[in-house]
Image (cartoon, grey):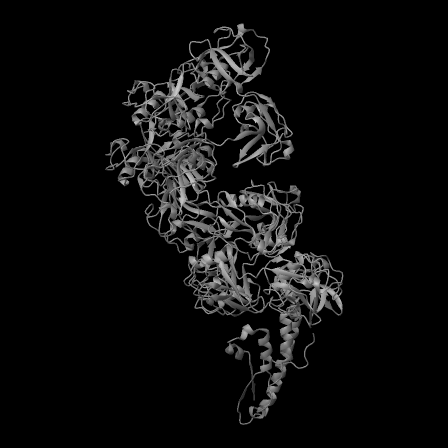
Amino acid sequence: MGLPGCLLFMAGQCNYRSVAASAGARITRIPILLAWLWASLTGFLVAGNLELRLVNGPDRCTGRLEVLHDNIWGTVCDDGWDLAEAQVVCKELHCGMALSASGGAPYGQGSDPIWLDEVNCTGTEAALFKCKASPWGKNNCNHGEDAGVVCSGLPLSNVTELRLVNGPSPCAGRVEVLHDEQWGTVCNRSWDLSDAEVVCRELGCGKVLSIPAGSQYGEGSDHIWLDSVNCTGREAALSECRSKRWGDNSCSHGEDASMVCSEPTEIQLVNGPSRCAGRVEVHHNQQWGTVCDHNWDLNDAEVVCRQLGCGTAEFAPKAAYFGQSSNSIWLDGVNCMGTEAALSECSIKLWGNHSCYDGEEAGVVCSEPPPLRLVNGSSRCAGRVEVLHDQQWGSVCDNGWDTEDATVVCRQLGCGTVVSAPGSAWFGRGHDPIWLENVNCIGMEAALSECRAKPWGDHHCHHGEDAGVVCLGPTDLRLVGGYSRCSGRVEVLHNQQWGTVCNNMWDLMDAEVVCRQVGCGTPLAARFGEPVEKEPGPVWLDEVKCTGTEAALSGCSAKRWGVDYCHYEHAGVLCSEPTEVRLVDGPSHCAGRVEVLHKERWGSVCDDGWDFQDARVVCRQLGCGMPLSAPGKAHYGQGREPTWLDDVNCTGTENTLYDCRARPWGENNCNHREDASVICSDPMEVRLVNGSSFCNGRVEVLHAQQWGTVCAHGWDIRDVEVVCRQLGCGRPLSAPAVAEFGQGSGRTWVEDANCLGIESTLSECRVKLVGKSNCDHGEDASVVCSDPTPIRLVNGHHRCAGRVEVLHDQQWGTICDDDWGLLNARVVCRQLGCERALSAPGGAYFGQGSDPIWLDDVDCSGKETALFECTRKPWGEQNCDHREDASVVCKESPLLRLMNGSSRCSGRFEVFHNEQWGTVCDKTWDLQDAAVVCRDLGCGMVVSAPGSAYFGQGSDRIWLDDVNCTGTEAAFSECRVRLWGEKNCHHGEDAGVVCTDPVEIRLVNTSSHCAGTVEVFHDKEWGTVCDDDWDIHDANVVCRQLGCGTALAAIHAADFGRGSGPIWLDNVNCTGTEAKISKCGAVSWGEHNCHHREDAGVVCSEPAELRLVNGSHRCAGRVEVLHDQQWGTVCDDSWDLQDAGVVCRQLRCGTVLSAPGDAHFGHGHDPIWLDEVACTGTEAVLSECRAKPLGDHNCQHGEDASVVCLELPVVRLVNGSSDCAGRVEVFHGSLWGTVCDDGWDLNDADVVCRELGCRTAVLAPGYAHFGEGSGVIWLDRLNCTGKETSLSECGSKPWGEHFCYHREDASVVCSGPLELRLVNGSNRCAGRVEVLHNQKWGTVCDDNWDLLDAGVVCRQLGCGTPLLAPRGSHFGHGYDPIWLDEVSCIGTEAALTDCKFKPWGDHNCHHGKAASVVCSEPAELRLVNGSHRCAGRVEVLYDQQWGTVCDDSWDLQDAGVVCRQLGCGTVLLAPGDAHFGRGHDPIWLAEVNCTGTEAALSECRATPWRYHNCQHGKDASVVCSEPVPANSYLPLLLLGLAVGTVLLCAAVIFLRRRRKQQDGALGHFLVQDEAAFATLERGHPDLFHNHMTFRHSLSISCYFC
């Protein structure tokens, strides 16, 4: 560019005339030099109006950018290409918002000229030609750098080219389009939902609801403009869809297209974790705006939740809880009753009339909606059926609607049985979409979504056909206080409160209805006078009278709700457990199609692999005889329920079909033509004949209605044991084989019997059923059993509970409950070998017997050894019926014991199985096995595990062999063993156990032995202590007795969980100096007036036997141990990681990191207590490791041992969906405890999130949002500022001091840790993509991987723009799981997990196809809202979020550092007061104080991050000069020459004028060129706004002589 012909000064020119001579003269024109200089410094503007297009993309709003110049299309280079430029392109093309600005020719390389390079837009320009760029055609690029753009596709133009007419709203009617300035219709040929979807989108309506046929909204009269419209549904406007040419059609107006869209959304929740939580925004005047939180409460929130179709309102947060908005504040003073249908129906101020500020936005948290509901009915169990789809409720058409469909609805809603299934909009017409038609349920489905139906939204119905349902009502019935879910006191729900049923007239028919309603089996008993400790609530029903056929108790007749004269007379029920397997459609219960029960639903079994062994297990489980056949192919007809099992593979020895191997439930490749069946023989009846009692004699079995004998071939004691059990006799004594009880005379039915000894009946054993045997009657088998115990308990849930029956005259019979009490029960429990008596219920509590009533008026003292020693009426003499049968509940005797030892904690180990004690073989028997036995028996530590019958040989069965315990099991039953009775041992190998005697006191229900619920040992049983008068003195005694530290808290109200045994102590009164709790004052053992909800607890400090000193935290330092009340060190001889690991474990630290010696943490000064420590690494405490005797060493303090362990967190979140959400728990006194929600807010939650590395807090819910804790409540009244690094730095009440319950536990939801990373790259913004799932990192497959996916990764990581999306494991192969495949992002997602992809772990890739990303490095500092990149509001990046800087003390030194860091020129201005507009993100910095020499703003002094007292009205800004480009040196040189020339010219003129000076007067001229300033201000308004002084300083004064 050449120099101008006349060179002038920047803002004015020297004038040769005097002031007088200049009067009235025009001010000089715009200096040419100024314009030339400005263009040189700032770059060229793209000249003229510019035509542009996007090519090679999937639509007109995506592709390679091309511009038209000199009538030739050409590309744009990607140098400096970013979203600002893309935004201008999208705006100019009416394509919505810019989604990405990609380089590297993502849409193919162009072949025409590269017209533009270094394009630089601010993003606010209306067209690309207004942006700066290099001159046309000047570039240093190739076509591999062609720029691309992806726009959202939503048109920004407000010009209406489309409308719906003749409908009830702007979103419904006949479709008309504008062409040639004339409206016309669209032909409905091929018109479908995809076409209608585009129209709804273009009009700003909601979703498409229907496309009526046949000119439903009237025929048009103008042109028919469009025909054969074909949209994909993704277009932004109808004009983008394919169709015939305008006006080309063969239609009539009777074929005009119509449609119905839903109304546009009027309310939304934004910035929340789901669509049902967030900041409230309402739509008004085509713009979204917020609601002010003045008077905002749960009633207002309830209306919002209802309007959005969410659940109920849970929280109505204020103070911009979900972030501030920059939109208008539309509503203020909202006042709802809570019953309104929409927020607009509530009392509000005029739209836009408010007195609020930013930061007062209202929010709402609703519960998530159910997917199904009944509306407009009298209760929640009756109404019009509506289903939720695509976040919108809609109705169901009644075509084909019947009771089977309604049954599924009732089941899904928990509303009991169906009453009716009305159609024809019985409950009123709906207004939302009709989602379903032709629903076809079989009635067994768990949810309506499992039924067959047309596709969603596909129907030919109107709302006059909406389906309805009436259900009987919710189940609202439960059994409580029983021994299983099928027994207990009957309770019903009424008025949202549970209450009991009075037992007046209560009988088995009523019980049958209850059993059916709760999904149990048949009624065994209708209990009377169900005993309870305390009145459990109101008595809701009385005089219930059922026929037994009702579906629910609510269907029976009864007195009115609420009975006030029936206390302590509660009705109860004992039902049988539901059968889990059955044979159906066969001739008997032992033959038929196999069906199994799963998820409370019967289903069939596939015959794949079905054989005799599988059938054997079914026959055994059903108590039938031997399997006769195992037919498949639906031998007994096809089932209609689910096929639950396939590929069943039994060995034949399993107890139930569920013990066999099979595919997972419901997984099969079968149809019902392959249903499996079983034919079993009927169970064999057995008898013993010719003996002295019914428990000995020759064995005979009944088959084909004829008695026959059993051949003695292979007959042994195991077979005898089964016969004894089947007959109800005692133990097997012998198995005579040679017709000891005489020869039979009939058939020999069975030979080769082979029993394991554990079967219930002989028919369950492997036997050969023959009609003709090769045995003769001289080989008839016989049995000798001991006589049965003359007393038993039946129908109970274990052998020590049930109805009492006694044996008399070889027949069992019951006992009448007259005078029956706990003393009688105590004798029964003793006689049966059970533990103490718990209760002695009457009233046929365990069901009515059917045999004789043998005894009445039994009266025991409680000390008798057998019931027959008590006084009573004579046998059979009574005045009772079976409704008065007596029962007993004893504490179940243990299933294991130690015999022949010196105490109950040492001896030969015996286990109880099949009503018989037996020993355990010592093969593989070791200390781990013995330790579990000690724990299970409540003894102390294991001492030894002797074998070889150390405590004498047993005489009963050897039950177990090859026992294998890990030592950590809670009970012996959890260890691995062989099958019961399977062994190759003799009694000379019986195993033994020696444990230490048990402690007298313990703390349970926590992981620490120094905290928990207090339990004391008395009368061979652990029990709790009542919290009456429980205080810190009592707690101190407990801590002392346990060898723990001092008492930290005395816990009340079963904070650590309720006990289940006896309550041994009450009103404990210690002075605090006693050695043990038994020395304190208390009422007598077992006397109390408490419940287990009053169990006392204790928190003690851990005993200080070990510590780490001089380290940076409590888990690192020099090891010191306490001995003889003095601390001392440990010598490092042989000190290693195993030793250090034990120290870490004992101190409750994390894993060991190192075990340094050589006094790494300084020399100790006290004794050296330990040397040559040798731990295996499994010890619980250091004192368990081998070492020299205490004090014996050859070391100096320069050899002191040290440990560094991983420091564990002292705060955690539990019960949440991730590690960054849940109930807050803190660690104190070696114990985790909760935090009370009094005063709990986001500041407190922020500290928790920061401490856990979970970024920032999103929610701070109280009221035990994530469930109630069960331990101690440690903190209350927390008061954090939000700046603390740890919760322990916040103010609060003292530890353990509170007035809260666990229903007030505080919770936190954080934004969460980063779940994405880039590895193996050169920096954190480049590398192989890895995602975290199931707590494990894994890779992403590169199938379909592109720059849109990469852009989401870059955004999520806080990096810059995506540069590359390499495939083929560009950054190396991964070795972990391949988590994601076929990722498909549109580019706007906030996280990669928001994109579409296959299910987690589902892929067809290998590690050679790992996806990678290269992003630009993120800027840590930026200037925004200015006219160029070197001017604007200052924003800094912290915690992956941009935020502003407060202008407190902001000056030119601070601004100068910003200019330097950004590579801009010199600082011009440092304006404050939000000169470039207010920010909306956090204010990160305040009180910035730079010296001006720093390289980056982060080097300057300032307040801590986030710590400030500013508003966004004080955001700091900077104006720097723009940097001079490298290619501008020549123009600057020419400029210098020009300036020199001007100065020389000025000097000459000055000298000439001086000669003519009159009277020596000095004339002072200040000449300003206003036009020049106007041009300068247009280019940089920010430089000159309100800076007149600066403006005048740019003027030039010329002095003339």
Q: How many marks?
A: 0
Closer to the camera in the image, 616 or 1048: 616
The quadrant of the rendering that contains the N terminus is bottom right
Quarter location, residue 1179: top left
Closer to the camera, 902 or 340?
340
Q: Is residue 747 visible?
A: yes
Q: Position of residue 312 (x, y in %)?
A: 46, 53
User: Taking 1012 as reference, is 357 left or right?
Assistant: right
State left or right for residue 1014 relative to residue 54.
left
Q: Is residue 1330 above or below residue 726?
A: below
User: 492 left or right of 47?
Assistant: left
Quadrant of res 628: top right
Quarter of the image with the C terminus in it: bottom right
Task: Give the vertical position of 419 relative to 1386 (above or below).
Answer: above
> Nearest the camera: 525 or 1103?
525
Looking at this view, is 988 or 842 the one in front? 842
Image-based side of 1429 in relation to 140, left or right: left
Q: Residue 35, percent across and down? A: 63, 76
Tell me the residue at 65%/41% (across/down): 1406
Q: Position of residue 704 (x, y in %)?
A: 56, 16
Q: Position of residue 60 (x, y in %)?
A: 69, 61
Residue 114, visible in the rendered structure: no
Q: Residue furthest bottom?
A: 1559
